[in-house]
Image (cartoon, helix red, strand yellow):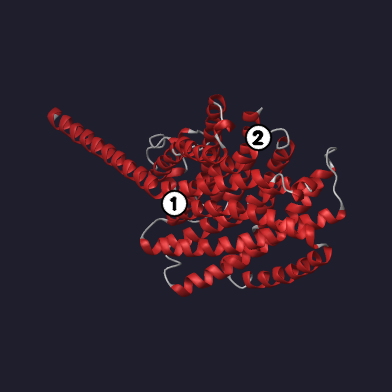
Amino acid sequence: MGEGVRLRKQTSGQDSGDKSKTVAVNNADEGAKVLKEVSFPYVLAGLGMVGAGLVLDRVQYWKVFQEIPQLFIMVPALIGLKGNLEMTLASRLSTHANLGHLDTVPQTVRMGGANLALIQLQGVVVGGLAAGLAVFISLFSPQSSIQALSCLVLVTSSIVTASLASFSLGIVMVLVIAVSRRLGINPDNIATPVAASLGDLVTLSLLAVLATVFQAAGPLLQIIILLTYLFIAYYCKRIAGEYNETRSILENGWTPVLSAMCISSLGGTILNRVITTYPNIALFQPVINGVAGNLVGIQASRISTDLHRSSELGNLPRDLSSCSLINPLYTFSSTACSHSRQLGINAVAARMLLVLVVPGHITFNLAIGLSQGVHVFSVLFVLLYLAAATLQVGLLLYIANMMVHWMWRRSIDPDNAAIPYLTALGDLLGGALLALVFL
């Protein structure tokens, strides 16, 4: 009998060991898959952000930015539209694609059209409010004042920039997600980096050019454009309201977008205060914020898709109910909650995304150095910058793990709400940490 007990224990131990080895192999495979699918679009996105930094570094000396410094307050808020609208759209459509809701052309056209109308309306509203918030913040700054005509330039350039950027990037998102699905690539790993690669550069370039044009054109043209956008917003509202997928967001999805805009504007206030003293900060601000938003957007989108697959909104999977996500080990350790395969896979992805931070930023800083000269760097600056970027992304991945699951448990779809908050927090953290690095 004792021999039988020993034999059962040995067999049980063997099974447990085999299971552990299988989990380790699966985790390694998942990590390799994440790196393989994310690396190229991540580098592409980073180079797009370097381009945005070069644009901001150049346009900060343009006449319109010198005469209307409130434009700097709007920069993070408008760039944040990438997180508020395009990356949220990418997350939402990636989930639909993984659930098979975009497998036919009519499905793609129907859902893509409704979502494009929705983000066009959101872009117009957020663009106008971002300009209003920039004016409001400047009223409490003793170092800046603003005239009525400058306010008109701010509002018009902000709305048109948000509208054109949202529409063009939205079309790209729909196409990228549809093609990724057909090629067997997880859209969660592709779509948000593509949005990030184009969003900053397109938005900043549009803002600089449009603000210059509207300042020179005079108020009549701007008033006509603003009236036209009232009709465009009304028409988009009607289209978005016709479909169930977008009607609920139209009615209940404004809080994350508007809250994120306010948080990003606080980052803009930091930029506006330090850019005169440290003009080189313009080179790095879009990069450090964009990389963080890019990586945390991927993770939030992945977690949300897994929850959509495994449970009903409002109920966490059973194997997650006993895990306290406040513990950061559950974000980065695949063995911390051994009975939850989902948490383990997400932890592997989080580690891989964190690993990309330092080599990515070194690559992007080299690109900045090649274009601007190495005089913008010192060894101490690079070390502090890399430490700040790693801390920023680590904190955001930890917050994302808690936030997405918290939203799901409270019947809030994280596809519509999580990424705006996360990218806005990334803007604020990035702005504050970067300012400390320059100080």
Mark 2 nearby-residue class (10 Å; few <14, some 14–19, many ≥20)? some
Q: Please determine whether, in this image, residue 32 is positioned above or below residue 239.
A: above
Does residue 2 show up?
A: yes
Does residue 249 show up?
A: no
| Residue 209 locus on image (x, y percent) | 69, 56
Please give the name of the residue rendered at 83% of the width and 66% of the height, measured from the top-left corner.
220
Please give the name of the residue rendered at 73% of the width and 52% of the height, measured from the top-left corner.
130
Q: Quadrant for residue 278, please give it.
A: top right
182 or 222: nearer the eye? 222
Is there a contact, CB below 8 Å, between mark 1 and mark 2?
Answer: no
Q: Which residue is mark 2?
A: 432
Residue 189 got which mark? 1
Who comes first in sequence, dot 1 or dot 2? 1
| The C terminus - image quarter | top right
Q: Is residue 233 left or right of residue 317?
A: right
Q: Secondary structure at mark 2?
A: helix
Q: Secondary structure at mark 1?
A: helix
Residue 40 got which mark? none
State the separation of the CA atoms marked 1 and 2: 28 Å
Q: Is residue 145 left or right of residue 324?
A: right
Give the farthest residue toward the bottom.
106
Which amino acid is tagged 2? Answer: Ala
